[in-house]
Image (cartoon, rainbow, N blue to C red):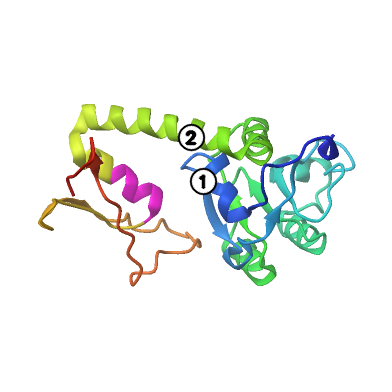
């Protein structure tokens, strides 16, 4: 039961997003609510009640098609409104919302994430629960997965393959400079897909990370 487990520390929806979900899970609306604290995770069930034990601060995972199969009135807009009314922390779905649905999430400041079609929502639920219960262990796991992924990309396509992947994941331009500041490689953020309603990076914002190996600053 949720009350038998204590999260290592409070996580916001913004914290949980990269910690629990893979890079192909995107935010498509409700960015203003990303600082909502996530207390627990609840998946939509194929029977009533749809979200057992849903309370304030829960992140909901739902398949809109399952909801519509139960009752044609259970549209994604309806789910967004009901979850916002319940002060949920956010909603993750497995199909692309319409612009109107994403705009509704924006109006209600309810973060709405979308996973690729066919995504295993139960697996995503387990990952989110792991992050809530033991943030440090989940962080270490994600770091190990990322290291293995980028080592494979580097071996197959060099630095450029890594940068292209980062540019897609971050939706931002990515640059590598050497220790003297000279540009080595770069990859541009991909153009938004048609109908994409998610936030775009702020061009005025720049994050800088040191590249260090064996204590040496390389770039």
Residue drawn 30% across the image and 53% down it: 209
Q: Can residue 118 be seen in this view?
A: no
Residue 169 placement (x, y as % from top left): 39, 47
Residue drawn 64% across the image and 46% down it: 93
> Most prominent secondary structure in the magenta stretch?
helix
The answer to whether 190 is drawn above or below residue 134 in the figure is below
Element under disc 2 = helix
Q: Mark 2 points at which residue?
A: 142
**In front here: 103 or 57?**
57
Residue 32 placement (x, y as % from top left): 60, 68
Residue drawn 59% across the image and 47% down it: 16
Asked if residue 14 lies left or right of residue 145, the reply is right
Which quadrant would the N terminus be assigned to in this image?
A: top right
Q: Are marks 2 and 1 in contact (CB under 8 Å)?
A: yes
Q: Name the residue under label 1.
A: 18
Report if residue 169 lies within the magenta region.
Answer: yes
The answer to whether 86 is drawn above or below residue 46 in the figure is below
**In front here: 164 or 12?**
12
Residue 79 placement (x, y as % from top left): 76, 55
Asked if residue 39 lies left or right of residue 199, the reply is right
Among numbered discs 2 and 1, the one appearing first in the sequence: 1
Report if residue 67 lies within the magenta region.
Answer: no
Residue 187 placement (x, y as % from top left): 23, 51
Which numbered circle lies on residue 88?
none
Element under disc 1 = helix
Residue 7 sits in quarter: top right
The answer to whether 66 is drawn above or below residue 102 in the figure is above
Please tell me how crowded label 2 is: few (under 14), some (14-19), or many (20+) other residues with Cα within 10 Å. Answer: some
Distance (Cα) linking label 2 and label 1: 9 Å
Asked if residue 193 lies left or right of residue 137, the reply is left
Q: Is residue 99 visible?
A: yes
Span of residues in magenta: 164-171
């Amino acid at each position: 039961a949720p009350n038998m487990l204590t999260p290592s520390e409070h996580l916001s929806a913004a914290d949980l997003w990269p910690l629990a979900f893979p890079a192909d899970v995107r935010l498509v609306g409700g960015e203003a609510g990303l600082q909502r604290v996530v207390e627990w995770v609840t998946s939509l069930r194929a029977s009533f009640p749809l979200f057992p034990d849903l309370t304030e601060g829960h992140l909901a995972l739902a398949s809109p098609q399952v909801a519509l199969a139960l009752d044609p009135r259970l549209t994604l807009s309806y789910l967004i409104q009901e979850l916002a009314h319940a002060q949920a922390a956010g909603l993750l779905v497995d199909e692309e919302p319409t612009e109107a649905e994403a705009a509704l999430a924006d109006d209600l400041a309810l973060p709405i994430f979308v996973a690729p079609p066919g995504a295993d929502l139960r697996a995503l639920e387990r990952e989110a629960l792991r992050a809530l219960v033991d943030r440090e262990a989940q962080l270490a796991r994600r770091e190990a997965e990322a290291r293995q992924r980028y080592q494979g990309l580097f071996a197959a396509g060099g630095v450029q393959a890594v940068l292209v992947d980062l540019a897609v994941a971050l939706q931002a331009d990515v640059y590598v400079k050497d220790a003297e500041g000279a540009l080595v490689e770069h990859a541009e953020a991909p153009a938004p897909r048609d109908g994409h309603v998610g936030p775009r990076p702020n061009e005025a914002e720049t994050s800088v990370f040191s590249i260090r190996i064996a204590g040496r600053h390389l770039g």
